[in-house]
Image (cartoon, rainbow, N blue to C red):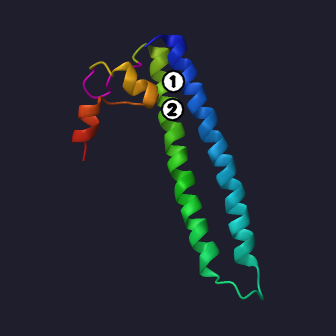
Amino acid sequence: MDHDRAHKLLRAERAKLQGLLSDTGEAQQLDRAAERETGSGADGAQPLAAEGLDDAFAAGQRERLAALDRAEARLDEGTYGRSIRSGLSIPDERLEADPAAELTVEEAQSQP
């Protein structure tokens, strides 16, 4: 894949993830505020459950951002588009779908 195209894909993915994290942060604040409310007839477990889901989602997005950091490092090193396991080329179609892909499809499918 062309260096400029890869860089553009990685930037776009990062911007999308940062937007999701921002939205999740706002949702977490609302959930925490709802959890602190007293005197309402609302179920107190519902905001707590939503907060847990938001936290799990945010953790997954932070992991995804770390994968983008690793992909950008590979791009700078000249190894972007190659499997970190085997060194085999990762098809451009896979990189278009997942710019942070570290493995070929076959390697990802065989991973436990």
Residue under the image location 72 percent in, 88 percent down: 41
Q: Is residue 51 left or right of residue 86?
A: right
Do the CB atoms of the residues marked 1 and 2 lie less than 8 Å apart?
A: yes
Separation of disc 1 and disc 2 at Cα? 6 Å
Q: Relative to 7, say whether 45 is above or below.
A: below
> Was residue 82 drawn as part of the magenta stretch in this picture?
yes
Out of 69 and 8, give the one closest to the viewer.
Answer: 8
Q: Which mark is residue 41?
A: none
Q: Amino acid at mark 1?
A: Glu
> Was residue 103 drawn as part of the magenta stretch in this picture?
no
Element under label 1?
Answer: helix
Screen quadrant of the N terminus: top left
Q: Report how many numbered discs are placed on residues in the image.
A: 2
Residue under the image location 74 percent in, 77 percent down: 36
Q: Which mark is residue 68?
A: 2
Q: Which residues are magenta?
A: 80-87
Q: Relative to 2, say whether 86 is above or below.
A: below
Residue 91: where, in percent of width, then height?
34, 20
Residue 8: where, in percent of width, then height?
57, 20
Q: Amino acid at mark 2?
A: Leu
Q: Which mark is residue 72?
A: 1
